[in-house]
Image: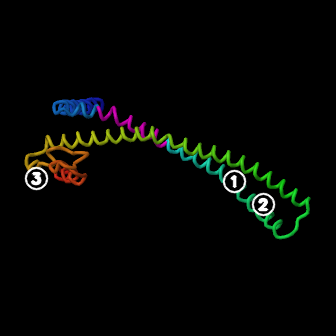
Amino acid sequence: METNIQHEMLARVGAMTRTLHDSLRGLGFDKLIERAAHDLPGAKDRLDYVAKMTEQAAQRVLNATDAAGPLQDGIDQGAAHLTDGWNNAMASPFTEAQYRALGEQTLAYLEQARSNAGSTKQHLMDIMMAQDFQDLTGQVIKRVTELANNLEKQLVQMLIDYAPPEVKRDAGSGLLNGPQINPEGNPDVVADQEQVDDLLESLGF
């Protein structure tokens, strides 16, 4: 008895699925659903790629900044120390040995400052190179945005095409032209998401 019930349930579910499938095909929706099923996973992968590249770039910038900070601190502290030393030398007589020692400190500082400046330049270059992800991720984001816009346009147009006559009449000519990305200069098209929301609400969604 239980087996018969299961078979009957499966048969009814199968019949409903076939009816839905045939209806969607007859209305031309099957191709849209097929494209969405194909494109949306790809869009998710692209967005995951953007998130990964952005995270990597942010980490590279933080690492370069952390490395450059102490180098600049060393230049600043060394300059402050030498400034005090030369101020003292100008304010009171220094022996030859003191001048020699101060001169050696100055030469050592200049050499270290040159090295720190070179290292800082490399870190700044790393920060600049970390921004190259924007070219790639910008292209990816553009493609995902185009996909979302195209899907929305097709879905809204689908609703408009098969909406009841009274809904079409209330919607007006703007919605009947479908959603537009750039409505400037064309007042008879959907200009914003609010109009799309109005259409969905009028259809009971």
Residue 9 relative to residue 80: left or right: left
Q: Identify the residue shown where x is 69% and y is 53%.
A: 70
Query: Closer to the N terminus: mark 2 or mark 1?
Result: 1
Mark 2 or mark 3, which has the lower sequence index?
2
In front: label 2 or label 3 = 2
- Chief secondary structure of the magenta portion: helix
- Horizontal side of residue 84 vs 134, given as left or right: right
Pick the quarter of the image with the N terminus. top left
For mark 3, does the 10 Å Cα neighbourhood hold few (<14), some (14 to 19), or many (20 or more) residues? few
- Specify whether residue 50 is painted magenta: yes
On the image, the x and y values in percent for residue 142 come to 37, 40
Q: Are marks 3 and 1 in contact (CB under 8 Å)?
A: no
Tell me the distance, in whole angstroms, between the alpha carbons under discs 2 and 1.
Answer: 18 Å
The image shows residue 14 at horizontal and vertical percentages of 24, 30
Residue 13 location in percent, x, y? 25, 33
Q: Is residue 32 above or below residue 166?
A: above
Q: Tell me the residue that label 3 is attached to.
A: 170
How much space separates mark 3 and mark 1, taking CA atoms?
A: 67 Å
Q: Between residues 190 and 129, which one lies in front from this camera angle?
A: 129
Residue ID for mark 2: 82
Amino acid under disc 3: Asp
Amino acid type, label 2: Leu
> In the drawing, what numbered circle is on residue 70?
1
At numbered mark 3, what does the secondary structure look like: helix, strand or loop? helix
Can see residue 205?
A: no
Residue type indicated by callout 1: Pro
At numbered mark 2, what does the secondary structure look like: helix, strand or loop?
helix
Label 1 SS:
helix
Residue stretch rendered in magenta on the structure: 35-51
Q: Nearer the viewer, residue 193 or 1?
A: 193
Residue at position x 66%, y 53% from top?
A: 69
Q: Position of residue 74 (x, y in %)?
A: 72, 55
